[in-house]
Image: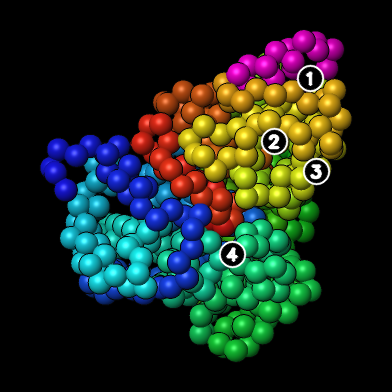
Amino acid sequence: MPAHQTHAEIVSALTARWPENRVAPSLGRIQALMELLGDPQRAYPVIHLTGTNGKGSTAAMIESLLRATGLRTGRFTSPHLMSVNERITIDGEPISDDRFDEVWRELQPYVEIVDERDIDGVAMTFFEIITGMAYAAFADAPVDVAVIEVGLGGTWDATNVADGQVAVITPIDLDHTHLLGETVAEIATEKAGIIKPGAHAILAGQSLEAAQVLLERCAEVGALPQREGPDFGVLSRQLAVGGQLIRLNGAEGPVDDVFLPLYGAHQAANAAQALAAVEAFLGLKAVNPDVVREGFAEVSFPGRLEVVRRSPSVVLDAAHNPHGARATAAAIQESFDFNPLIGVVAVMADKDARGVLTVLEEILNQVVITQVASTSRGMPAHELAELAAEIFGADRVHVAPRLDDALERALSMADTDSTGSPGVLVTGSVVAVGEARTLLVRPEDARTPDPESGSGSDADWDADYADEPSANGQFSGEDDWR
């Protein structure tokens, strides 16, 4: 690699590899890379997360709690909203462009060796490389603990070369059925692969079929399950300015007066699971309540019911499947009093667009249909608009293929009604939310959301990865990661 290669050129070259939305179900390549690097993923303990929705927010909460206890943390998440560096954070901060480039230069010769081996006929993928970079960066830091979110599924996900002492399984629902299975049980089987022998398994409330699979896996490998409800959970919650005040069931009893700067019942449930995960990591010991309050108060995870503008308010939420959209809709109705509420919606072509729109129809007065610009995988605006017209009625549907035009039109529609409290909700795709955030948030504010905005819903993503770099050379994708 030429020494003069810029950060954007490095990212562009990496994202030109096999993309995240294509799956080569093998750990052979990432295992080979880790062996060449001396297995950095074994240099620190790991808390591993999977699920259909909520894992990104839960990972952010776990990391914030761990930092509040005084531990140095690494966190690996995907996809990202605005910069690929967001995926690799140390002590809560994304690594710099220079450090990203340095880590890649250190790994590149070893990646080339693995490529030459032609394992399963596939060169190392983008996600495998970025996973290897995260594990190496955390070992170099060094971190005391790494919080690792799977990219897609579990068993065959590149992150699964690590053995988590704690496995966190957020709610499982249908998503990526063409890759993970047609039923909830099949998807749960794939995700259960991160539960390792002797680990603690922190299980969110699940459907009966998913719960059965997960508990059978725990019994098979000798993992200790802890279930939402009997073992941990939310005891009570109430709305607060910029989020909610919650009471959690901790290892040694209730933890009162915990402020969570995120909106929605689903985020409160994520917080309960995060606390249980940290307590399990610390040996089933209670965390000092003051430390718990400090950790949750500092949580930030942009793109989840994040208010990025007022008068009229603009809210960004990365819901991209019906399960996530339902959580978003409930949180919007509970936490805000928008009237009217105008939607700006773009959906990826491989998602359940009808299911998402059907949920959103219940809360949106009007919808402006648009499409993402940074990948060809977005559903064309005219196709999505036809579907929206069937669900909303043609008189409530407007079309603006360019996102900037869609935002301008939605804001104009919201401004027209001065009798209520108008709002604009941008949703339907992680990619769309990232593009909207780039347009609406000043660079100097990108990592410091308004503390009263409650960056918060979690339509967490089970990976809806884009297969092309965006215009600025950054990869933008959407999951299982989510």
Q: Type of residue at label 3?
A: Val
Closer mark to the observer between disc 4 and disc 3: 4
Q: Say which residue label 2 marks.
A: 383
Q: Is residue 107 above or below residue 80?
A: below
- Residue 372 visible (yes or no): yes
Q: Quadrant of residue 472?
A: top left
Residue 412 is one of the magenta-drawn residues: yes
Q: Residues within 10 Å of mark 2 (few under 14, many from 20)?
A: few
In the image, which disc is placed on residue 421? 1
Q: Which residue is mark 3?
A: 359
Mark positioned earlier in the residue sequence (4 or 3): 4
Q: Which residues are magenta?
A: 405-426
Position of residue 383 measured from the top left corner of the image (x, y, whole percent): 69, 36
- Along the viewing direction, whichever of 60 and 473 lies nearer the viewer: 473
Of badges 2 and 4, the one in the foreground is 2
Q: On the image, numbered disc 4 is attached to which residue? A: 179
Task: Using a 10 Å C-alpha cutoff, classify the residue at mark 4 as few (fewer than 14 neighbours), some (14 to 19) or many (20 or more).
Answer: some
Left or right: 418 in relation to 90 = right
